[in-house]
Amino acid sequence: MSDFAERLRKLADAKNDQAAAEESAVAFQDRVNKFIVLHARAEYERLRGELETKVLEVNPKLGDLPKYEFMQGNAMVQQGNCIASLYFDMPYTNLPNNQLLVGFGVHPNAMYFDEQDRPQPIRYKLQAAADDAFAGIVWVGDLGEITTARLVEFVLENLTVYYLENKPK
């Protein structure tokens, strides 16, 4: 075979390999998307359940700190006059588009005589994603990649820090 014919054959092979790789990437992304659609809402519900369980477990050990109060209907945890709130939005049940907002702030009904003294809220945006082994959901975004168990601890730790930094004097 001539050198020119050999180059043409290699060019065709490379194009075929590229097309196969693109098809494989599309198929993989489709698999990831389907996994997220099937598991994200359930993982959020598991997050809420683990948060409620952790609150019950930790409350007796808080000493002089105000106890956590888990508010089931609002997916909020209150400590003193501060709250941590969770909001999960998955607007399309057949698409992996989703958003988990985690916020820390003072309770909406907390009274401040001078609004400038009202502490600023802190917010984080996360998104449900498939873990590397397709064994579960992890949360990715402003906090990097974080598991549900670690996110529960993050919420309670940061609520306490927020409370301590902003508690009434």
Image (tube, rainbow, N blue to C red):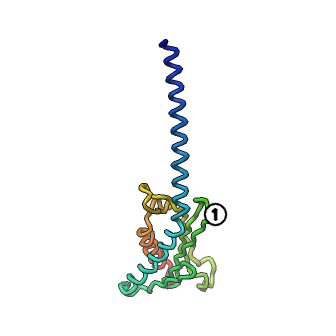
At label 1, counting other C-alpha atoms closer than 10 Å, the crowd grade (few under 14, some 14-19, many 20 or more) is few
Q: Residue at x 46, y 83 (%)?
A: 68
Residue 22 at what x, y percent from top left? 54, 40
Q: Is residue 55 left or right of residue 168?
A: left
Q: Is residue 114 left or right of residue 32?
A: right
Q: Nearer the viewer, residue 163 or 130?
A: 130
* Number of numbered discs visible in the structure rendering: 1
Residue 16 at what x, y percent from top left? 53, 32
Is 95 situated above or below 102?
A: above
Q: Residue at x 57, y 69 (%)?
A: 88
Is 98 situated above or below 132?
A: below
Is 36 situated above or below 49?
A: above
Q: Residue at x 58, y 59 (%)?
A: 96
Is 38 situated above or below 111?
A: above
Q: Is residue 83 left or right of residue 160?
A: right
Q: Nearer the viewer, residue 82 or 91?
A: 91
Q: Secondary structure at mark 1?
A: loop
Please name the residue that numbered disc 1 is placed on.
92
Q: Nearer the viewer, residue 6 or 161?
A: 6
Residue 90 at what x, y percent from top left? 60, 66
At label 1, which amino acid type do we have?
A: Tyr
Residue 41 at what x, y percent from top left? 54, 68
